[in-house]
Image (cartoon, rainbow, N blue to C red):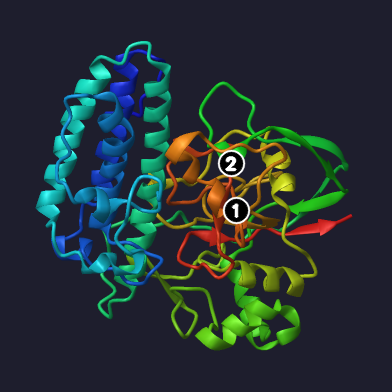
């Protein structure tokens, strides 16, 4: 189905955007049995059923309850079960135990979604000219798009944990490819501006726009490939402590890391949402932690870029690439001149701590908990991935994860000082 344009303040585009997003979420779940949607494979991942309910809770909590006086919550305890981390809204069921929620059933969660969707459409029919509701709908859409990506990455971790290695669905085979030469493209020094300053939507953590000083540097023309990472493995990269940050080396030894997540022991295949596939040596390496990305960069006589370097490089480029809409659901080999794969394929780790921009102010009220309170001990990733909706991406978008995270579609772009 074609994607609607971003909304104006009238009801029709808001309804189109809302309906498209809610339908897209359910389409991602096609191919899952009810049993698949209940299981939680690790504390950082959530069951698909929980994602379906939580995104519904978001609309109920932040739009229906405050803006539709006649609305009555679907179930008195769903606010507790499906609140994620909004302490100012109420209590929440513990994240590591979400897999214990066999009830409500998937059918009941779908009923919850239908109940909330009907009420939301009623609300939006009378939302003409209400800029606050228009903003909250756009925020809710972007929130749900984040969970669309999490549905895919979380279910991938679950299915890969099954000895049967079942596929989510039949995915197209990536186009035939060969590894293109990696070049380093010189980028000038000087004062640049980063952060969002447009008229459309952005998250609060992308603001305010501000000046940064860039030193002379060079960015790799593409993402690091599976073939290049395989060289790192075979050269003993996972056994050489001098390449690793102290915390990373401790993690390698504690977890027994020897290769990217989902790679087979013989390094010839890896699990994808289409089932096991031969490792494409020309495609970007994926499912590596910040620690692995940093160690590889050191081994390659390079470093990871800063988020300012990547944003400045990406700001003039069209937002195009291998996003979730391509259907591959895995990185594919790129090509072409100049900077490629800036968008899509893999989220690229940066060396930048996830911290507030100068003058940052979170959203007012409970929605201020969305981003700001996580600005500690995490690293920024840029560019989107093969599991990201294309319309969700901006050059200023800041993703963030802890440095040991591997289950997200994260990869590597190199940089060098000039």
Alpha carbons under labels 2 and 1: distance apart: 9 Å
| Quadrant where the image shows the N terminus | top left
Residue 370, image x, y percentages: 47, 45
**Dot 2 and dot 1 residues touching (CB under 8 Å):** yes
Q: Nearer the viewer, residue 393 or 143?
A: 143
Residue 159, image x, y percentages: 30, 69
The residue wearing badge 2 is 205
Residue 296's image quarter? bottom right
Element type at marker 2? helix
Element type at marker 1? loop
Residue 110, image x, y percentages: 15, 46
Residue at figure coordinates x 50%, y 80% from the top left: 267
Q: Nearer the viewer, residue 111 or 337?
A: 111
Residue at figure coordinates x 37%, y 49% from the top left: 147
Query: Which mark identifies residue 135?
Result: none
Left or right, 321 with reference to 81: right
Mark found first going from the N terminus, 2 or 1: 2
Question: Total label count?
Answer: 2
The residue wearing badge 1 is 375
Left or right, 333 with reference to 299: left
In this view, 35 is above or below 86: below
- Regarding residue 5, the answer to whether it shows in the image is no
């Amino acid at each position: 189905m074609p994607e609607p344009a971003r909304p104006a303040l009238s009801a029709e585009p808001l309804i189109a955007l809302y309906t498209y997003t809610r339908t897209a979420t359910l389409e991602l779940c096609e191919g899952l049995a009810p049993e698949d949607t209940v299981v939680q494979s690790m504390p950082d991942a959530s069951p698909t059923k929980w994602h379906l309910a939580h995104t519904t809770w978001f609309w109920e909590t932040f739009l229906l309850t405050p803006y539709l006086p006649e609305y009555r919550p679907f179930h008195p305890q769903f606010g507790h079960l499906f609140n994620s981390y909004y302490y100012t809204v109420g209590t929440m069921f513990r994240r590591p135990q979400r897999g214990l929620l066999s009830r409500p059933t998937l059918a009941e969660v779908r009923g919850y979604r239908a109940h909330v969707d009907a009420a939301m459409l009623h609300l939006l029919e009378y939302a003409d000219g209400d800029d606050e509701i228009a903003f909250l709908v756009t925020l809710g859409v972007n929130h749900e798009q984040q969970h669309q990506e999490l549905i895919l990455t979380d279910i991938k971790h679950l299915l890969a944990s099954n000895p049967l290695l079942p596929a989510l669905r039949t995915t197209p085979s990536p186009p035939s490819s060969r590894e293109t030469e990696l070049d380093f493209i010189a980028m000038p020094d000087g004062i640049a501006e980063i952060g969002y300053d447009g008229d459309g939507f952005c998250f609060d953590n992308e603001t305010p726009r501000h000046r940064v000083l860039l030193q002379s540097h060079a960015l790799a023309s593409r993402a690091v490939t599976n073939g290049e990472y395989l060289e790192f493995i075979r050269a003993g990269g996972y056994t050489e402590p001098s390449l690793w940050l102290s915390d990373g080396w401790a993690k390698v030894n504690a977890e027994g890391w020897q290769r990217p997540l989902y790679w087979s022991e013989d390094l010839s295949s890896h699990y994808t949402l289409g089932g096991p596939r031969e490792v494409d040596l020309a495609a970007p390496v994926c499912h590596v932690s910040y620690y692995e990305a940093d160690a590889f960069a050191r081994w390659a006589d390079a470093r990871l870029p800063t988020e300012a370097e990547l944003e400045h490089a990406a700001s003039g480029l069209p937002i195009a690439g291998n996003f979730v809409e391509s259907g591959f659901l895995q990185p594919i080999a790129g090509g072409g001149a100049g900077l490629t794969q800036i968008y899509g394929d893999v989220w690229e780790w940066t060396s930048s701590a996830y911290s507030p921009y100068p003058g940052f102010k979170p959203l007012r009220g409970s929605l201020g908990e969305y981003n700001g309170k996580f600005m500690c001990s995490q690293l920024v990733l840029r560019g989107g991935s093969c599991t990201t909706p294309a319309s969700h991406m901006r050059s200023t978008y800041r993703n963030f994860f802890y440095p040991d995270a591997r289950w997200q579609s994260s990869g590597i772009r190199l940089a060098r000082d000039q």
